[in-house]
Image (cartoon, grey):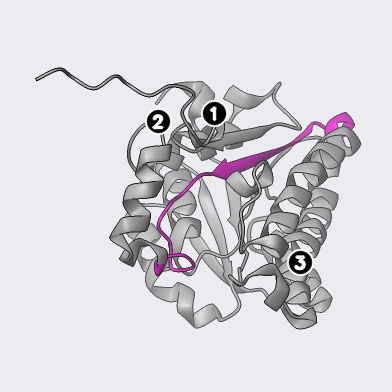
Amino acid sequence: MTPLFDLTGQVALVTGASRGLGQYFARALATAGADLIVTSRRKDDLLPFVTEIEALGRRAVPLSLDVRDQQSILAMAEDAEAAYGRIHVLVNNAGCNVRKPALDVTWDDWNLILDTNLRGSFFVAQQIASRMVPHRYGRIINIGSVTSVFGYAGLAPYGASRGGIRQLTMSLADDWGQYGITVNCLAPGWFKTQQNQVLYENQEWVDYLVDRIPMKRPGQPHDLDGAVVFLASEASGYVTGQTLLVDGGISTGSMRATVAPKQRT
């Protein structure tokens, strides 16, 4: 492996790793050589994945974490540091969503999404960064989405949380750069996950989506492998405060300015 992208000897902490993109991020980092700490609200949910990572020849420590609970965040950070002595990389992935028209969003819906996606991400980053500062090194990757830069109907609280992640990333990059810590936002486009799989059951919607993506397909989880390894590695040492969209180009614009002429028969 090119040394710039080699994570051998490093420890990466991935939150929300019991399923979905969190596991793909963790696999990519392990394949690049990192040992892992993986978290979920229920520690037992992580055990099959830990076995998988160990089969790759890497260590993986499972920890329980509820990002809506401050004491849970504090305990996780202490246990993570105790497991390896040092954390080099944080992938702030834990999140949730509730899809509703804006008029139907409840007070509790809003709190659930913002407390999980935004407040939780900040306080996890704060705890892990405090342990990176003495070493004058760290890579923090906040997971955003295309909604960090685009607004979509039915996603008001989610879009607010992901837009907040983008702004938070820039602020923390400025705050912690002096300690050798980079902070970036990895923003996937439209990827099929358990959170949104109901949308992909509607073929008409899938066709509509694909028509708006320049690459003409939704994202596949492995499309994110290179980006997460890049942001975790020495290759991105002078990149901080940035939002890296991995979206097949949908953020270039959602409609055509021209229409191809019809072929003559």
Q: Quadrant of residue 33?
A: top left
Q: Residue 109, located in which quarter of the rendered image?
A: bottom right
Q: CA distance from mark 1 to mark 2?
A: 8 Å
- Residues under labels 1 and 3: Cα distance? 27 Å
How far apart, in angstroms, are the residues tagged by discs 2 and 3?
31 Å
Percent of width and height locating residue 55: 32, 58
Q: Which residues are magenta?
A: 177-198
| Screen quadrant of the N terminus | top left
Q: In which quadrant of the rendered image does the C terminus lie?
A: top left
Q: Which residue shows up at 49% across the image and 31% down it?
A: 6
Graded by Cα atoms within 10 Å as few (under 14), some (14 to 19) or many (20 or more), the crowding at tag 1 reads few
Q: What kind of element bears circle 2?
A: loop
The residue at which mark 3 appears reads as: 114
Residue on which disc 2 sits = 214
Residue at far left of view = 265
Asked if the residue under mark 2 is in contact with the one under mark 1, i.e. CB atoms within 8 Å, the reply is: yes
Query: Which residue extends farthest front?
Result: 265
Is residue 107 a member of the stretch shown in magenta? Answer: no
Q: Earlier in the sequence, mark 2 or mark 3?
A: 3
| Residue 10 visible in rendering | no
Circles 2 and 3, Cβ within 8 Å, touching? The answer is no
State the mark number for residue 252.
Answer: 1
Q: Residue at x 72, y 59 (%)?
A: 81
Other-residue count near label 3 (Cα within 10 Å), few / some / many at <14 / 14–19 / ≥20: many
Residue 87 left/right relative to 128: left
Residue 156 % position (x, y): 70, 61
